[in-house]
Structure formats: structure tokens, C-alpha cells
Amino acid sequence: MKRVAVIGGGVGGMTAAGELAQRGHQVTLFERSASLGGKAQAVTASGVQLDTGPTLLTLPHVVREGFRRLNAEDLLPRFIELPVHCEYRWLDGARFEAHRDLELTAASAERLKAGEGEAVRAFYAAAADIHRVAGEPYLEAPFYGALEYLMRVARRGLGALWKGSQLPTLDALGTAHFSSRHLREFVGRFATYAGASPYQASAAFALIPHLERAFGVHHVVGGMGALSVALGQAVERLGVKLQLGATASWREQRGELLVGPEGDAQRFDAVVVNADPLASLGRADEPLALSGYVLLLEAERSALPHHTITFAADYPAELNALFAGGAPDDVTFYVCHPAASDASMAPAGKSGLFVMVNAAPLSAAVDWAEAAPRLREKCLAHVRELGARDVKVLGERTPLDLARAGAPRGSIYGFLPHGRLGPFRRPRIRSRVPGLFYSGGGTHPGGGVPLVMLSGHFAAHLASQHLEARA
Ligand SMILES: Cc1cc2nc3c(=O)[nH]c(=O)nc-3n(C[C@H](O)[C@H](O)[C@H](O)COP(=O)(O)OP(=O)(O)OC[C@H]3O[C@@H](n4cnc5c(N)ncnc54)[C@H](O)[C@@H]3O)c2cc1C
């Protein structure tokens, strides 16, 4: 039995801890806050349940498989698949709905502009192909290096290698398919799922709309926070020793790994760090992925759909301003109304609304004491325009809160995957220090709940290999 430390109890850290315990190791998980879950947590106020971080679940089979590996399927909350993935709105009155059913999505695009229905079919076919040539090889195993990855791509045929090397930016892919700016903005929005800009990130991000269509968009009953609670229970049941309220660090001393809170470091055979890796790799000065401003609201029971996105009047200008570190006035709003699909999320007659606006990572250019009240008023005015009545503020999260929780400068995803080779520069799970591994949104394969579960799985696999080699 080897001793393994996990620093951080986010979804990626808990997954790694549970799998390592399941493999028979003695695991201690240090979490600096009082609860597990990291960014994936929920609050209940006035009987309304709202997530404070992730709200939308894709790749449900990856999460189910993660719980199955922990022998914890009994703990997994129920998922509700949403027939309408998202309603997109623009200030000129244009609307578009993305459905699970491709033909309904195509019909919605055709209503927006004649000819765009066929373009939707062609776009999703291209997105499926991008997933096959670039996404599948990226998600199927840990990233060991560009050469090994390219060999995995080549196994899909030399045509796949050629196609993968030709990918333009996500915006260029949208422009190649759609003549309507609205649908180009719809495509571009998927880069922001990784905190990136569609004008600088690779068209590889088109695999996200493909995965949403192929595997559905889901709501977790009780919210994503309930998923974190279930994962915490699974990990505890597997015998992981939890140290909550314990800020830990690691250091290497004469070939040994010492881990623990200041003044109480102990020797471990391996460590999985679930905190963002950029700082410890000396890359803290890199440009970072976007942060976010979140407003949590209670309202009279609303007729809003589960997910609504309303684009800024000038979306490219909003993104350019954000990536220049500013706080644009003209913003894109995302509103999540979980009670639309799950009545248990709010008492009768009430709705909870989660409103999110993209924000730049913290910098001297934005004073959040001034920016937060301004965004709060904008979000309140926006939900009222969407028809929300009797709106009360339940809570607010700014990039400062994310930074206090350990996110580098409040960036949700840390590493910024810009450029064609961007994803290759992502910090790897296996570090250069023997026995030190990373898990979570800052490492391979990237952010988002299913992907960080995969990172935890890969980290546990690599750490076990290391421990077996030393046995
Ligand atoms: C507003 C918002 C909306 C999002 N929307 C979605 C969405 O709709 N769908 C989706 O799939 N994903 C979404 N995400 C992303 C998703 O939440 C994250 O990618 C994922 O939860 C990150 O998990 P992680 O394993 O990287 O750990 P994190 O959640 O980053 O947790 C890391 C943990 O490590 C702890 N820690 C850090 N340093 C130390 C230390 N030195 N000692 C001890 N503990 C330490 C922290 O306290 C924290 O608990 C969203 C995130 C946010 C913030």
C-alpha cells in the first residue's frame, strides 16, 4: 500500500483520489476550503437551489463511467436531457434554437435565414469529422507529447492527419459555413466554453457542438453541486482521508515528496495536484483564459427556457475588449433557469436564475469594486427584459472570488488554448518531477466537469504506473 496525497478537492482531485483509493492506495486529500467541489458547488437560498459554477453537463457517459470506476453508481444523481439545448437571441430580434434533433436545429436556422438549414447540416457533419480526426485522439488517453498524439491521429488514416493539420480558427470555420453573422456567433460561442476567443482558437473547438448533439445537453437533478456532493461521498466511502480547511503544498527533498500544510509536511510516494499548474510550472505570466461574473437571482416563476444566450450588439468587439483585459459595456448574457426542467430546484411559484457574463482575468485595468455593481444592474435589467418579475438578488461571484478560491487571476480555465498548436502547450498531467501529477481544468484534456473527471482518471492511471514501477 503506497501513500498518495491529493492537493485540492475539485472534481478532478476527487476523481483521482477515489480511483487511487480504489486501486488499493492509502490516499489523503487536502482541501483548503471547508467543502469539496471547488468551482462545482451550489447554494440554497429562500428555498431556491442554484449552482454557483457549472450548470450544463455534456458527455454524461464520461461522468457515469467515472462513478462506475469508483463503484458509486448508486450515488450518482439523475440527469435530465434537455430537448432544446439553448435558445440564442440577438438584439435585432433574431432567434435561433439548438436542439438535440438536428432537423429541428436546421429548421430553426432556415427560419433565421433561407439556406442556413442546409448550412447547419454541413456544419455539424464537419464538426463530427473534426471530432473524429482531432477530438477522439485527444480525449482517449493522456497527452504524452505532440508526436505520440499525431501517431494516434494517423491511426485514423493519413487523411485525418492532413485534415487535422489544416484546421483554421473556429470563427473561420463558422464563416466558411454560414452567411448569417448570427450563426457565425453561435459557432464562435463554443470557444468561450474553454475561456478562449473564436478569432484565435482552433476550429477543433467545433467538437463541442458535435458532442452536445451526439450525447445531449443535460441537467443534473439538484444541480452540478449535487454531483460534487455525490463524488465526495464516493471518495469518503472508498476510505480517502479528507483534510478540509487544509492548505497544502508539496516539495521535493532528496528524491522524496513532502506534502502537507505549512509545518506539517509528511512523506508521500506520489502526489496529485488539483490546483492550477501554471504557477508551479513558472508559467504564471502567460495570457490566461477568461474569467466570469455570476449573479444568482430569485424571481416569480418564469417561463424562460433552461438556457438562454443573448449576444452583445457587437460580439467581436466584446471579445476583443475582454482579451485586451478590459470590461466592455456591451456584453453577452447567459441565463440558466434550472426550474424550467427540474421543479425541485425552486419552491412552487418561484424560479432561480443564474446569470453569467464573460470577464477578463484580473488585471489593474478593471476595478471590481466599480465593475461589479455596473454588471449587476445590467444583468438585472436583462432578466427583466426577458420577462422575469419580482427579481431579488441571492448572491454574486466576481473574478475576485474565483481568485480567492485559487484560480489564477480568477481565470476559470487557466491555460489559454489560442493558436493552432495551442492545445499542445497545455500543461501535462505527468510533471517533470517523478511522482508528481496534475489533475483538473488546468491540465489535459481541459476544463469542464466531464473533462476534469477524465483528467482525474488519467492522473490516477499515471500515478499508479509510477507507484507500481517503484514497488
Ligand atoms: C462560473 C462557472 C461556470 C462554469 N460552467 C460550466 C458548465 O456549464 N459546464 C462544465 O462542465 N463546466 C463549467 N465550468 C467549469 C468547471 O466548473 C471546472 O472546469 C471544474 O469544476 C474544475 O474542476 P477542477 O478539478 O479543475 O478543480 P477546481 O474546481 O478548480 O478545484 C480545485 C480545488 O483545489 C483547492 N485548492 C487549491 N489550492 C489548494 C491548496 N494549496 N491546498 C488545498 N486545496 C487547494 C481549491 O480550494 C479547490 O477546491 C464552469 C466554471 C465556472 C467557475
Image (cartoon, rainbow, N blue to C red):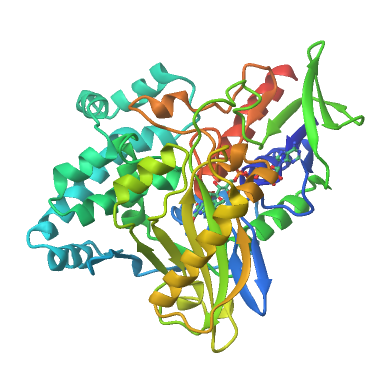
Would you place residue 208 above or below residue 42 in this image? above
Residue in the image at 62% along x and 53% along y: 369
Residue 89 visible at all: yes
Left or right relative to 67: residue 101? left
Residue 430 in percent (x, y) is at: 59, 24
Would you place residue 245 above or below residue 56 in this image? above
Q: Residue furthest front?
A: 370
Q: Residue furthest left?
A: 115
Residue in the image at 52% along x and 51% along y: 292
Along the viewing direction, whichever of 273 and 414 lies nearer the viewer: 414
Q: Residue furthest bottom?
A: 349
Along the viewing direction, whichever of 239 and 308 lies nearer the viewer: 308
Residue 221 in percent (x, y) is at: 55, 70
Along the viewing direction, whichever of 447 and 267 lies nearer the viewer: 447
Left or right relative to 172: residue 43? right
Left or right relative to 329: residue 48? right
Q: Residue furthest right?
A: 263
Residue 379 in percent (x, y) is at: 48, 66
The quadrant of the picture occupied by the N terminus is top right
The quadrant of the picture occupied by the C terminus is top right
Residue in the image at 73% along x and 37% along y: 7
Residue in the image at 49% along x and 59% along y: 356
